Amino acid sequence: MTGNLPLSGMKIAVTRPRDQAVKLAHMIEQVGGTVLLFPLLEITAARNPQALKEQISRLKEFDLVIFVSPNAVHYGIAAIHKEGKLPAKLKIAAIGQGSAKALHERGISNVIVPTQRFDSEGLLSMPELQNVAGRRVMIFRGDSGRELLGDTLRMRGAEVEYAACYQRSKPDQDGELLLAAAPDAISVSSSEALENLWELLDNKRQQILRDTLLFVPHSRIAELAVRQGWQHVQLTDSGDDGLMTALKTEAERKGSI
């Protein structure tokens, strides 16, 4: 019986790219929740595969490779393996635990990864990234993103090159469908996705959605949500487990009122 499950009666909108939402949707449904898949980003292969291929051909000249996201791992490692393999001498770093886990699943161990703050600032605080003068660093990411990581490493004396191994785009969505579904909570995992959601709605509809409980995994996204006017923003721990814990805690809180 679903009535006794932790998320029974709770409808959650999951806004990740559709392929990446399947596992999380299953986890929510396993504990009684109802899932509305409403992707706010699409992730596809690199816009310029030839440029990426050329960069990968020079990996042996680099000292450190950084993967900024699980998507960067997925598309970056696939492109690397298509051309050969990672040079043995390369040091590997990842911004967060999700990216590190994706690397481990592909047989890549000894990953430099933050243990507390899972973002560019967290990685930049690691001892291994302090004395990088004269080092060559390649950062695998999407077709755009924050420049803090590269800029800071350059200020520390490193030579930095970005490798765009995937691209992000805004899917064709109808904001009215999300409003009509009236979810109890919405999960958003990036600032870009949250901005895409706001662009789907006029001011009147934004006002309606602002009262919905919003779950986000990073303080930077939470800050954007507050600026947009969301009234109930919940900051979760990273990854699927972090979101599931927060959802269950909220369901318990509502159940006790």
Image (cartoon, rainbow, N blue to C red):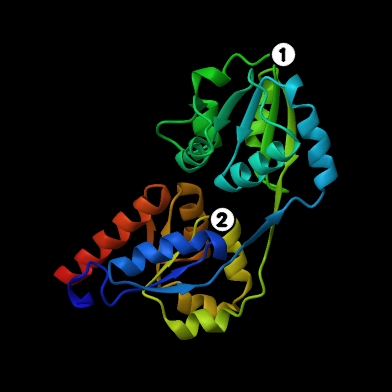
- Asked if 202 appears above or below 108 in the picture, the reply is below
Residue 255, percent from left and from top = 18, 71
Q: Position of residue 184 (x, y in %)?
A: 36, 74
Residue at screen point 49% across, 24% down? 110
Q: Quadrant of residue 154?
A: top right
The foreground one among 74 and 7 is: 74
Looking at the rendered image, the quarter that the N terminus falls into is: bottom left
Q: Give the residue number, with chain letter if any, for mark 1.
A: 134
Q: Going by the picture, which residue comes out furthest to the bottom?
A: 180
- x and y, in percent, of residue 144 in the image: 71, 47
Of labels 2 and 1, earlier in sequence is: 1
Q: Residues within 10 Å of mark 2 (few under 14, many from 20)?
A: some
Q: Residue at x 35, y 65 (%)?
A: 28
Q: Is residue 140 above or below residue 20?
A: above
Would you identify the image quadrant in which residue 148 lies?
A: top right
Question: Element type at marker 1?
Answer: loop
Viewer-side residue, 173 vs 58: 58
**171 left or right, relative to 21:** right
* Residue on which disc 2 sits: 191
Whole-number angstrom distance, CA of label 2 to CA of label 1: 33 Å
Q: Is residue 232 visible?
A: no
Is 69 rendered above or below residue 111?
below
Q: Secondary structure at mark 2?
A: helix
The residue positioned 60% from the left and 37% from the top of the image is: 67
Name the kind of residue labelled 2 in the image: Ser
Q: Is residue 118 left or right of residue 133?
A: left
